[in-house]
Amino acid sequence: MVKDESLSPQGKMQLELAQNEMGALLELQKRFATEKPFKNQRVGMALHVTKETAILVRTLIAGGAKVAIAGCNPLSTQDDVAAALADEGVHVYAKKGETKEEYYEYLNHVLDFKPTATIDDGMDLVSLIHTQRPELLKELKVGTEETTTGVNRLRAMAKDNALKYPIVAVNDNKTKHLFDNYYGTGQSTLDGILRSTNVLFAGKNVIIIGYGNCGKGVASCANGLGANITVCEVDPLKALQAKMDGYMVVPFEQTLSFGDIFITVTGDIHVIPVSSFQKMKNGAILANSGHFDVEIDVVGLKKLSTHTRRVRWQLDEYTLPNGKKIFLCAEGRLVNLSSAEGHPSTVMSLSFCGQALALEYGIKNDLKPGVHVLPEWADAEISRLQLKAMNLSIDTLTEEQKKYLNSWQEGT
Protein backbone atom coordinates (compact mmCIF):
# COMPACT_ATOMS: atom_id res chain seq x y z
CA MET A 1 0.00 0.00 0.00
CA VAL A 2 2.24 2.76 -1.33
CA LYS A 3 1.53 6.09 -2.98
CA ASP A 4 3.02 5.43 -6.43
CA GLU A 5 4.52 2.10 -7.54
CA SER A 6 6.10 3.76 -10.59
CA LEU A 7 8.59 5.49 -8.27
CA SER A 8 10.37 2.18 -7.65
CA PRO A 9 13.31 2.76 -10.07
CA GLN A 10 14.17 6.05 -8.36
CA GLY A 11 13.82 4.37 -4.98
CA LYS A 12 16.25 1.63 -5.97
CA MET A 13 18.83 4.28 -6.88
CA GLN A 14 18.29 5.83 -3.47
CA LEU A 15 19.04 2.47 -1.89
CA GLU A 16 22.27 2.24 -3.88
CA LEU A 17 23.35 5.62 -2.48
CA ALA A 18 22.52 4.55 1.07
CA GLN A 19 24.45 1.28 0.76
CA ASN A 20 27.59 3.19 -0.19
CA GLU A 21 27.59 4.75 3.30
CA MET A 22 26.35 1.77 5.33
CA GLY A 23 29.29 -0.63 5.26
CA ALA A 24 28.91 -1.70 8.88
CA LEU A 25 25.32 -2.84 8.37
CA LEU A 26 26.28 -4.60 5.13
CA GLU A 27 28.87 -6.62 7.07
CA LEU A 28 26.09 -7.82 9.37
CA GLN A 29 23.95 -8.54 6.34
CA LYS A 30 26.66 -10.91 5.03
CA ARG A 31 26.77 -12.82 8.32
CA PHE A 32 23.00 -13.01 8.58
CA ALA A 33 22.77 -14.37 5.03
CA THR A 34 24.94 -17.31 6.12
CA GLU A 35 23.61 -17.93 9.64
CA LYS A 36 19.89 -17.11 9.08
CA PRO A 37 19.18 -16.01 12.70
CA PHE A 38 15.70 -14.80 11.75
CA LYS A 39 14.49 -17.95 10.02
CA ASN A 40 10.73 -18.46 10.56
CA GLN A 41 10.42 -15.01 12.17
CA ARG A 42 7.85 -12.43 11.11
CA VAL A 43 9.10 -8.93 11.87
CA GLY A 44 6.58 -6.10 12.13
CA MET A 45 8.17 -2.69 11.82
CA ALA A 46 7.06 0.90 12.47
CA LEU A 47 9.99 3.03 11.34
CA HIS A 48 10.56 6.06 9.14
CA VAL A 49 10.47 4.55 5.66
CA THR A 50 13.71 5.99 4.33
CA LYS A 51 16.48 4.66 2.12
CA GLU A 52 18.45 3.74 5.25
CA THR A 53 15.54 1.82 6.74
CA ALA A 54 15.26 -0.08 3.47
CA ILE A 55 18.81 -1.40 3.94
CA LEU A 56 17.83 -2.62 7.42
CA VAL A 57 14.81 -4.37 5.90
CA ARG A 58 17.06 -6.07 3.35
CA THR A 59 19.41 -7.11 6.17
CA LEU A 60 16.60 -8.78 8.11
CA ILE A 61 15.33 -10.53 5.01
CA ALA A 62 18.85 -11.78 4.29
CA GLY A 63 18.75 -13.28 7.79
CA GLY A 64 15.61 -15.25 6.96
CA ALA A 65 12.89 -12.89 8.21
CA LYS A 66 9.61 -12.01 6.59
CA VAL A 67 8.93 -8.29 7.01
CA ALA A 68 5.96 -5.94 7.11
CA ILE A 69 6.57 -2.22 7.62
CA ALA A 70 4.57 0.94 8.21
CA GLY A 71 5.78 4.48 8.79
CA CYS A 72 6.11 5.85 12.31
CA ASN A 73 5.29 9.45 11.34
CA PRO A 74 2.71 10.67 8.82
CA LEU A 75 5.21 12.91 6.99
CA SER A 76 8.46 10.93 7.10
CA THR A 77 7.96 8.29 4.40
CA GLN A 78 10.03 8.59 1.22
CA ASP A 79 7.53 7.41 -1.38
CA ASP A 80 10.14 6.23 -3.89
CA VAL A 81 11.78 4.07 -1.21
CA ALA A 82 8.40 2.62 -0.18
CA ALA A 83 7.74 1.73 -3.81
CA ALA A 84 11.16 0.09 -4.16
CA LEU A 85 10.59 -2.07 -1.08
CA ALA A 86 7.13 -3.09 -2.27
CA ASP A 87 8.68 -4.02 -5.62
CA GLU A 88 11.02 -6.38 -3.72
CA GLY A 89 8.07 -8.20 -2.15
CA VAL A 90 8.07 -6.46 1.23
CA HIS A 91 4.68 -5.76 2.82
CA VAL A 92 4.75 -1.93 2.88
CA TYR A 93 2.01 0.28 4.28
CA ALA A 94 3.29 3.84 4.11
CA LYS A 95 3.02 7.08 2.19
CA LYS A 96 4.08 10.65 2.83
CA GLY A 97 1.16 12.77 4.02
CA GLU A 98 -0.94 10.06 5.64
CA THR A 99 -4.00 11.15 7.54
CA LYS A 100 -4.17 10.21 11.21
CA GLU A 101 -6.74 7.56 10.34
CA GLU A 102 -4.53 6.10 7.60
CA TYR A 103 -1.55 6.12 9.94
CA TYR A 104 -3.25 3.81 12.42
CA GLU A 105 -4.83 1.76 9.66
CA TYR A 106 -1.35 1.02 8.29
CA LEU A 107 0.00 0.12 11.73
CA ASN A 108 -2.86 -2.35 12.10
CA HIS A 109 -2.03 -3.86 8.69
CA VAL A 110 1.44 -4.60 10.07
CA LEU A 111 -0.14 -6.24 13.11
CA ASP A 112 -2.38 -8.30 10.82
CA PHE A 113 0.92 -9.86 9.71
CA LYS A 114 1.00 -11.46 13.21
CA PRO A 115 4.61 -10.58 13.97
CA THR A 116 6.82 -12.68 16.19
CA ALA A 117 9.09 -9.66 16.70
CA THR A 118 8.63 -5.89 16.43
CA ILE A 119 10.88 -2.95 15.62
CA ASP A 120 9.43 0.37 16.73
CA ASP A 121 10.30 4.06 16.65
CA GLY A 122 8.15 5.95 19.13
CA MET A 123 6.32 2.92 20.55
CA ASP A 124 3.03 3.32 18.67
CA LEU A 125 3.17 -0.29 17.47
CA VAL A 126 3.81 -1.58 20.99
CA SER A 127 1.02 0.60 22.34
CA LEU A 128 -1.48 -0.72 19.78
CA ILE A 129 -0.56 -4.32 20.61
CA HIS A 130 -1.19 -3.78 24.31
CA THR A 131 -4.35 -1.69 24.00
CA GLN A 132 -6.11 -3.17 20.96
CA ARG A 133 -4.38 -6.36 19.83
CA PRO A 134 -3.38 -8.25 23.03
CA GLU A 135 -4.00 -11.61 21.34
CA LEU A 136 -0.69 -11.06 19.48
CA LEU A 137 1.35 -11.11 22.70
CA LYS A 138 1.50 -14.88 22.94
CA GLU A 139 3.65 -15.18 19.78
CA LEU A 140 5.87 -12.14 20.35
CA LYS A 141 9.43 -13.09 21.29
CA VAL A 142 11.01 -9.63 21.39
CA GLY A 143 10.68 -6.03 20.32
CA THR A 144 13.19 -3.23 19.83
CA GLU A 145 12.77 0.52 20.27
CA GLU A 146 14.73 3.12 18.34
CA THR A 147 14.22 6.48 19.99
CA THR A 148 14.40 8.34 23.31
CA THR A 149 10.68 9.13 23.34
CA GLY A 150 9.74 5.50 22.82
CA VAL A 151 12.15 4.23 25.48
CA ASN A 152 10.74 6.74 27.97
CA ARG A 153 7.22 5.48 27.25
CA LEU A 154 8.34 1.87 27.53
CA ARG A 155 9.96 2.45 30.92
CA ALA A 156 6.73 4.08 32.09
CA MET A 157 4.86 0.95 30.98
CA ALA A 158 7.35 -1.32 32.72
CA LYS A 159 7.07 0.73 35.92
CA ASP A 160 3.32 0.15 35.85
CA ASN A 161 3.80 -3.58 35.10
CA ALA A 162 1.93 -2.99 31.84
CA LEU A 163 4.65 -4.17 29.43
CA LYS A 164 3.90 -7.77 28.50
CA TYR A 165 6.82 -8.75 26.26
CA PRO A 166 10.56 -7.98 26.22
CA ILE A 167 11.77 -4.85 24.43
CA VAL A 168 15.42 -4.00 23.82
CA ALA A 169 16.08 -0.27 24.19
CA VAL A 170 18.34 0.29 21.18
CA ASN A 171 18.44 4.01 21.96
CA ASP A 172 20.51 3.14 25.05
CA ASN A 173 23.35 1.87 22.85
CA LYS A 174 26.25 4.32 22.94
CA THR A 175 26.65 3.79 19.21
CA LYS A 176 23.08 5.04 18.87
CA HIS A 177 22.54 8.04 21.12
CA LEU A 178 26.09 9.40 20.95
CA PHE A 179 26.08 9.35 17.14
CA ASP A 180 22.51 9.19 15.76
CA ASN A 181 21.04 11.61 18.28
CA TYR A 182 24.01 13.98 18.28
CA TYR A 183 25.47 14.05 14.78
CA GLY A 184 22.38 12.82 12.95
CA THR A 185 19.77 15.05 14.61
CA GLY A 186 22.10 18.04 14.53
CA GLN A 187 22.76 17.93 10.80
CA SER A 188 19.34 16.75 9.64
CA THR A 189 17.39 19.25 11.77
CA LEU A 190 19.20 22.18 10.23
CA ASP A 191 18.83 20.54 6.82
CA GLY A 192 15.06 20.42 7.34
CA ILE A 193 14.82 24.04 8.47
CA LEU A 194 16.98 25.21 5.56
CA ARG A 195 14.87 23.30 3.03
CA SER A 196 11.71 24.75 4.56
CA THR A 197 12.90 28.35 4.78
CA ASN A 198 16.31 28.88 3.13
CA VAL A 199 17.01 31.16 6.11
CA LEU A 200 20.54 32.35 6.88
CA PHE A 201 21.61 30.99 10.27
CA ALA A 202 24.66 33.23 10.63
CA GLY A 203 23.86 36.03 13.08
CA LYS A 204 20.45 34.62 14.01
CA ASN A 205 19.39 34.10 17.62
CA VAL A 206 18.61 30.38 17.75
CA ILE A 207 16.72 29.13 20.81
CA ILE A 208 17.21 25.42 21.49
CA ILE A 209 14.73 23.98 23.96
CA GLY A 210 16.17 20.80 25.41
CA TYR A 211 19.87 19.98 25.76
CA GLY A 212 19.96 16.21 25.65
CA ASN A 213 22.06 14.48 23.01
CA CYS A 214 19.75 15.75 20.25
CA GLY A 215 19.77 19.33 21.53
CA LYS A 216 23.55 19.24 21.88
CA GLY A 217 23.89 18.17 18.26
CA VAL A 218 21.52 20.86 16.99
CA ALA A 219 23.35 23.51 19.03
CA SER A 220 26.73 22.42 17.67
CA CYS A 221 25.58 22.54 14.05
CA ALA A 222 23.77 25.87 14.40
CA ASN A 223 26.80 27.32 16.16
CA GLY A 224 28.96 26.09 13.30
CA LEU A 225 26.82 28.11 10.89
CA GLY A 226 27.42 31.27 12.90
CA ALA A 227 24.21 31.44 14.93
CA ASN A 228 23.97 32.85 18.44
CA ILE A 229 22.82 29.94 20.62
CA THR A 230 20.57 30.15 23.66
CA VAL A 231 19.56 26.99 25.52
CA CYS A 232 16.45 26.48 27.65
CA GLU A 233 16.49 23.55 30.07
CA VAL A 234 14.73 22.14 33.15
CA ASP A 235 17.57 19.74 34.03
CA PRO A 236 20.28 21.52 36.09
CA LEU A 237 23.08 19.22 34.87
CA LYS A 238 22.21 19.73 31.19
CA ALA A 239 21.82 23.47 31.75
CA LEU A 240 25.29 23.55 33.31
CA GLN A 241 26.69 21.59 30.35
CA ALA A 242 25.18 24.11 27.94
CA LYS A 243 26.76 26.99 29.84
CA MET A 244 30.15 25.27 29.93
CA ASP A 245 29.81 24.64 26.18
CA GLY A 246 29.69 28.41 25.71
CA TYR A 247 25.98 29.04 25.22
CA MET A 248 23.56 31.40 26.93
CA VAL A 249 21.22 29.62 29.35
CA VAL A 250 18.01 31.43 30.31
CA PRO A 251 14.37 30.55 31.04
CA PHE A 252 12.28 30.12 27.92
CA GLU A 253 10.02 33.10 28.64
CA GLN A 254 13.01 35.44 28.45
CA THR A 255 13.88 34.32 24.92
CA LEU A 256 10.58 35.32 23.34
CA SER A 257 11.57 38.93 22.70
CA PHE A 258 14.84 38.16 20.87
CA GLY A 259 14.60 34.63 19.42
CA ASP A 260 14.66 34.35 15.62
CA ILE A 261 14.49 30.55 15.32
CA PHE A 262 13.02 28.26 17.99
CA ILE A 263 13.86 24.53 17.87
CA THR A 264 12.26 22.03 20.27
CA VAL A 265 14.05 18.76 21.12
CA THR A 266 12.59 17.67 24.46
CA GLY A 267 10.14 14.79 23.92
CA ASP A 268 7.61 16.65 26.09
CA ILE A 269 4.32 18.40 25.43
CA HIS A 270 3.68 22.13 24.86
CA VAL A 271 7.19 23.35 25.59
CA ILE A 272 6.18 26.25 23.33
CA PRO A 273 2.67 26.97 24.67
CA VAL A 274 -0.01 29.08 23.05
CA SER A 275 0.69 31.92 25.49
CA SER A 276 4.11 32.42 23.89
CA PHE A 277 3.25 33.15 20.29
CA GLN A 278 2.17 36.80 20.50
CA LYS A 279 5.25 37.64 22.58
CA MET A 280 7.61 36.47 19.82
CA LYS A 281 9.24 38.68 17.21
CA ASN A 282 7.44 39.19 13.93
CA GLY A 283 8.73 36.55 11.51
CA ALA A 284 9.93 34.09 14.15
CA ILE A 285 10.50 30.56 12.80
CA LEU A 286 9.38 27.50 14.79
CA ALA A 287 10.62 23.95 14.22
CA ASN A 288 10.33 20.69 16.14
CA SER A 289 12.80 17.82 16.13
CA GLY A 290 11.19 15.80 18.92
CA HIS A 291 9.38 12.62 17.92
CA PHE A 292 5.73 13.75 18.20
CA ASP A 293 4.01 16.94 17.01
CA VAL A 294 3.07 18.08 20.52
CA GLU A 295 6.13 20.08 21.58
CA ILE A 296 4.83 23.20 19.84
CA ASP A 297 1.16 23.82 20.63
CA VAL A 298 0.12 23.72 16.97
CA VAL A 299 -3.56 23.28 17.80
CA GLY A 300 -3.43 26.39 19.97
CA LEU A 301 -1.55 28.30 17.26
CA LYS A 302 -4.22 27.46 14.70
CA LYS A 303 -7.03 28.57 17.00
CA LEU A 304 -5.23 31.79 17.89
CA SER A 305 -4.38 32.81 14.33
CA THR A 306 -6.58 35.08 12.26
CA HIS A 307 -5.15 33.82 8.97
CA THR A 308 -3.07 30.85 7.82
CA ARG A 309 -1.46 30.11 4.51
CA ARG A 310 1.17 27.75 3.11
CA VAL A 311 3.85 30.02 1.70
CA ARG A 312 6.37 27.36 0.78
CA TRP A 313 6.62 23.58 0.78
CA GLN A 314 6.47 22.53 4.45
CA LEU A 315 6.31 26.13 5.69
CA ASP A 316 3.08 27.63 7.04
CA GLU A 317 2.56 31.30 7.91
CA TYR A 318 0.28 32.14 10.85
CA THR A 319 -1.00 35.71 11.29
CA LEU A 320 -1.72 36.51 14.93
CA PRO A 321 -4.34 38.92 16.38
CA ASN A 322 -1.59 41.48 17.11
CA GLY A 323 -0.56 41.47 13.45
CA LYS A 324 2.66 39.52 13.91
CA LYS A 325 3.44 36.57 11.67
CA ILE A 326 4.90 33.27 12.85
CA PHE A 327 6.35 30.64 10.49
CA LEU A 328 5.97 26.94 11.36
CA CYS A 329 8.10 24.29 9.67
CA ALA A 330 6.71 20.85 8.77
CA GLU A 331 3.39 21.32 10.60
CA GLY A 332 5.25 20.97 13.90
CA ARG A 333 6.25 17.40 13.09
CA LEU A 334 9.81 16.05 12.90
CA VAL A 335 11.41 18.72 10.73
CA ASN A 336 14.42 16.60 9.84
CA LEU A 337 12.27 13.87 8.27
CA SER A 338 9.25 15.87 7.15
CA SER A 339 11.17 18.62 5.37
CA ALA A 340 14.43 16.76 4.70
CA GLU A 341 15.54 13.13 4.45
CA GLY A 342 16.41 12.31 8.04
CA HIS A 343 19.81 11.34 9.34
CA PRO A 344 22.70 10.70 6.94
CA SER A 345 23.22 7.07 5.96
CA THR A 346 26.49 6.56 7.86
CA VAL A 347 24.98 7.42 11.24
CA MET A 348 21.92 5.28 10.54
CA SER A 349 24.20 2.35 9.74
CA LEU A 350 25.33 2.48 13.37
CA SER A 351 21.76 2.69 14.68
CA PHE A 352 20.48 -0.10 12.48
CA CYS A 353 23.39 -2.38 13.37
CA GLY A 354 22.03 -1.93 16.89
CA GLN A 355 18.50 -2.79 15.76
CA ALA A 356 19.65 -5.92 13.93
CA LEU A 357 21.85 -7.14 16.80
CA ALA A 358 19.10 -6.38 19.34
CA LEU A 359 16.62 -8.45 17.36
CA GLU A 360 19.10 -11.31 17.10
CA TYR A 361 19.88 -11.06 20.84
CA GLY A 362 16.20 -11.17 21.77
CA ILE A 363 15.44 -14.14 19.54
CA LYS A 364 18.44 -16.16 20.77
CA ASN A 365 17.86 -15.43 24.47
CA ASP A 366 14.79 -16.10 26.58
CA LEU A 367 14.16 -12.57 27.79
CA LYS A 368 11.50 -11.76 30.34
CA PRO A 369 8.90 -9.03 29.71
CA GLY A 370 10.37 -5.60 30.38
CA VAL A 371 12.93 -3.16 29.02
CA HIS A 372 16.36 -4.61 28.24
CA VAL A 373 19.66 -3.16 27.03
CA LEU A 374 22.29 -4.86 24.91
CA PRO A 375 25.49 -6.03 26.62
CA GLU A 376 28.65 -3.93 26.23
CA TRP A 377 29.99 -6.20 23.50
CA ALA A 378 27.37 -4.85 21.10
CA ASP A 379 28.73 -1.28 21.08
CA ALA A 380 32.26 -2.63 20.67
CA GLU A 381 31.18 -4.83 17.75
CA ILE A 382 29.28 -2.03 16.01
CA SER A 383 32.21 0.34 16.44
CA ARG A 384 34.59 -2.30 15.06
CA LEU A 385 32.38 -2.79 12.01
CA GLN A 386 32.19 0.95 11.38
CA LEU A 387 35.94 1.42 11.76
CA LYS A 388 36.44 -1.38 9.23
CA ALA A 389 33.99 0.31 6.86
CA MET A 390 36.01 3.53 7.17
CA ASN A 391 39.32 1.68 6.63
CA LEU A 392 40.57 2.78 10.05
CA SER A 393 42.89 0.84 12.34
CA ILE A 394 43.42 1.33 16.06
CA ASP A 395 45.99 0.24 18.62
CA THR A 396 45.78 -2.84 20.86
CA LEU A 397 46.95 -3.26 24.43
CA THR A 398 50.08 -5.24 25.14
CA GLU A 399 49.87 -8.14 27.58
CA GLU A 400 51.75 -5.99 30.11
CA GLN A 401 49.17 -3.21 29.74
CA LYS A 402 46.24 -5.61 30.07
CA LYS A 403 47.75 -7.07 33.25
CA TYR A 404 48.32 -3.59 34.71
CA LEU A 405 44.76 -2.44 34.01
CA ASN A 406 43.31 -5.59 35.59
CA SER A 407 45.46 -5.59 38.73
CA TRP A 408 45.43 -3.65 41.95
CA GLN A 409 48.82 -4.54 43.44
CA GLU A 410 50.91 -2.07 41.46
CA GLY A 411 50.75 1.56 42.53
CA THR A 412 52.88 4.64 42.17
Image (spheres, rainbow, N blue to C red):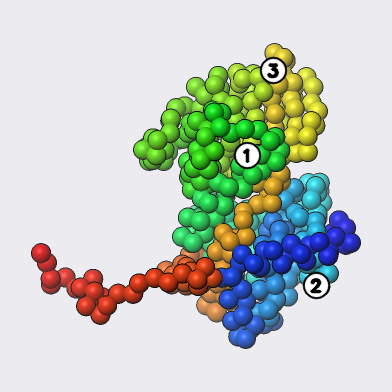
Label 2, secondary structure: give it: loop
Q: What residue is drawn where x is 49% and y is 65%?
A: 372
Comparing 222 with 102, the one in front is 222
Q: CA distance from mark 3 to mark 2?
A: 50 Å
Can you give x and y, in whole percent of width and height, for residue 100 in the image?
78, 46
Q: How many marks do you count on the picture?
A: 3
Q: Is residue 98 left or right of residue 362?
A: right
Nearer-N-terminus badge (3/2): 2
Residue that extends furthest to the top in the rendered view of this protein? 322
> Which mark, residue 288?
1
Q: Is residue 56 above or below residue 226?
A: below
C-alpha gap between disc 2 and disc 1: 34 Å
> From this viewpoint, is residue 53 visible?
no
Q: Could you tell me which quadrant the C terminus lies in?
A: bottom left
Q: On residue 324, which mark appears?
A: 3
Mark pair 1, 3: CA separation: 20 Å
Residue 88: image tag: 2
What amino acid type should be assigned to the residue bearing mark 1?
A: Asn
Residues at marks 3 and 2 touching, judged by CB atoms closer than 8 Å: no
Looking at the picture, which amino acid does disc 2 mark?
Glu
Residue at 53% in and 74% down = 361
